[in-house]
Amino acid sequence: MSIGQRIYRGVIIVIALGALALQGAAVWGGYWVAQNHQWVSDRAIALQFEPSPEIRDYALTATMTPEALVYYYASQPEVVPAVEFDRYCSRDEPGIGVLGCYKLGEKRMYLYDVTDPRLSDMEPVIAAHEMLHAVWDRFSEAEKDRLGVLLEDAFAALPDGHPLFERIESYEANDPRSRIPELYALLGTEVNALPAELEQHYGQYFSDRSSVVALAEEVNGVFASFGDELDRLVADLEARGEVIDQRKAEYELAAEILGADIAVYNDRVARYNEGEDIDGAENFDAERNDLISRQAALRSDQEEIQRLIDDHNRLLDELNILNQELTELNQGVNVTVEQQESLEDPDEEASEPEASG
């Protein structure tokens, strides 16, 4: 009985000690929670969030790590149709497509619904980009400063003419404070080779970051190929237009001279037929044959110029079709495009002078 009692008392002591230990942990835990409210909140929200299949697929395709998923799902990402998107993320500038935004005040993420199948690879890239904004939002100022130096160094090391230079310039023009946060999201999702320290950092959020970059490059390649083809067509059309203008100018001058010569010839023939004595009348046949020969050569020039014009206009039709396709692509990525003036069709064919007699 006493042994049992001792055991019982021992148990009581152990439990009491345990209670004291737990009480201490609760006090310390309360302090930790207060100091790490965002960390706790993010995980609580992420656990309760029920992602749609497409939101889940974006994360899978972008190879987001479990750590990244916390910030991604804590932002409660929502895919928004084009007609509603400006209510959440708006930036009305020609040539700028806004495909997603992370709202700092709400700590919410909104993603543009890209419906063009040629651009579907952009969606997981957008999701990854905005996820990195959510990550950046949680960093301390000291960590942001440390990363800012690494980001600027990596950005400066990009080759001349890299498209990110123009994009960062656009972000800065809209909001100078956005430079470093955008560098963080853009370098992380669209630049393949980064310094080792940055690669190690991004490795916390992507199991295979190169696959995200490959998706971005594929979509950017769609636009690049369109741009190259447009440049080629415009250059070809401009060169053809110059040739046509030159040939038309030569044709019109030759036609004007021929018209004058025919008028002189016809006048002399008319006066000769009225009985007037005309010098060189014996050469009328030779003159007429020469004029007819020149007229035939001019007609041949006219036909050749018309063929050049027809070829030019066929290319112009190709350009207009390509422009329409590019407009549709731009609409697919929420870009407002400034309409470019169309190249004009060449003038109608010139009339041909005729000799009488």
Image (tube, rainbow, N blue to C red):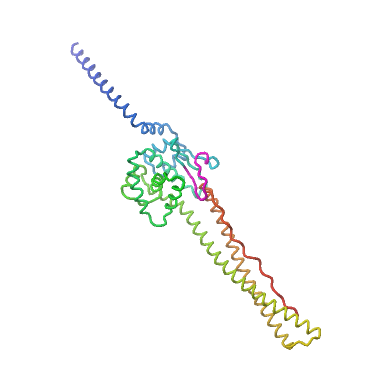
- Magenta span of residues: 85-100
Q: Height in image: 283 above or below 93?
A: below
Q: Height in image: 333 above or below 261?
A: above
Q: Is 309 positioned to the left or the right of 114 in the image?
A: right
Identify which residue, 151 or 288, lies in the foreground: 151
Marks counted in the figure total 0
Identify which residue, 50 or 34, lies in the foreground: 34
Q: Which residue appears farthest toward the left when viewing the image?
A: 3
- Dominant SS type (magenta): loop
Q: Height in image: 130 above or below 252?
A: above
**The C terminus: image quadrant:** bottom right
Quarter of the image for residue 279 reads bottom right
Going 40% across and 57% down the picture, which residue do you hit?
160
Going 26% across and 21% down the picture, which residue do you hit?
20
Query: Is residue 159 within the magenta segment?
Result: no
Q: Is 15 positioned to the left or the right of 264 in the image?
A: left
Going 54% across and 40% down the picture, which residue do you hit?
84
Residue 338 lies, in percent from the top left, at 55, 52
Query: Is residue 97 within the magenta segment?
Result: yes
Quarter of the image for residue 106 reads top left
Q: Which residue appears farthest toward the top when viewing the image?
A: 1
Q: Which residue appears farthest toward the right when viewing the image?
A: 274
Identify which residue, 311 or 166, lies in the foreground: 166
Going 31% across and 49% down the picture, which residue do you hit?
196
**The N terminus: image quadrant:** top left
Residue 269 lies, in percent from the top left, at 76, 82
Residue 224 lies, in percent from the top left, at 47, 56
